[in-house]
Image (tube, rainbow, N blue to C red):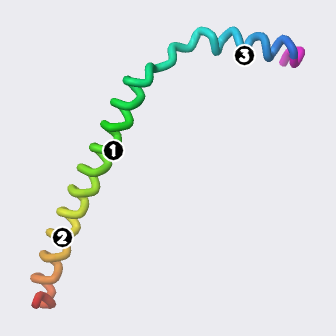
Amino acid sequence: MTKTNPAQFMREVRQETSKVTWPSRKETSISTGMVFVMVILAALFFLLVDQILSFSVKMILGIGS
């Protein structure tokens, strides 16, 4: 394992960071919106599945009102 000079390490980090392609503000907002939509859809799906399973278990056990 080779030891690196901290100054050289920081130069290499800056050099690599300059190669990164950062998303635009529009791309970031679109991606964020898509994440929120998918979270809401997943929450609704699991709510529906939970209600169906709950109803089924209550009917099987005869607890239903």
Q: Amino acid at mark 2?
A: Gln
- In primary-sequence order, the first of circles 2 and 1 is 1
Instruction: Give the extent of the magenta segment.
Output: 1-6
Foreground of the two, 50 or 17: 17
**What residue did someone put label 3 on?**
13
Q: Quadrant of the C terminus?
A: bottom left
Q: Indicate which label's residue lies in the foreground, 1 or 3.
A: 1
Numbered disc in front, either 2 or 1: 1
Q: CA distance from mark 2 to mark 1?
A: 23 Å
Q: Is residue 5 left or right of residue 46?
A: right
Q: How many numbered marks does the figure carry?
A: 3
Image spot of residue 14 (x, y percent): 71, 13
Please tell me whether the stretch drawn in magenta is mainly helix, strand or loop: loop
Q: Secondary structure at mark 1?
A: helix
Q: For the point 14% across and 69% down, which residue is it?
A: 52
How far apart marks 1 and 3 lie (CA) works out to: 33 Å
The dot on residue 49 is none
Give the labeled residue for mark 2: 51
Rendered location of residue 24, percent (x, y): 44, 20
At which x and y percent is residue 31? Answer: 36, 31
Rendering quarter of residue 47: bottom left
| Amino acid type, mark 3 | Val
Q: Quadrant of the N terminus?
A: top right
In the displayed structure image, the side of residue 34 where residue 60 appears, left or right: left
Q: Secondary structure at mark 3?
A: helix
Q: Position of residue 38 (x, y in %)?
A: 28, 44
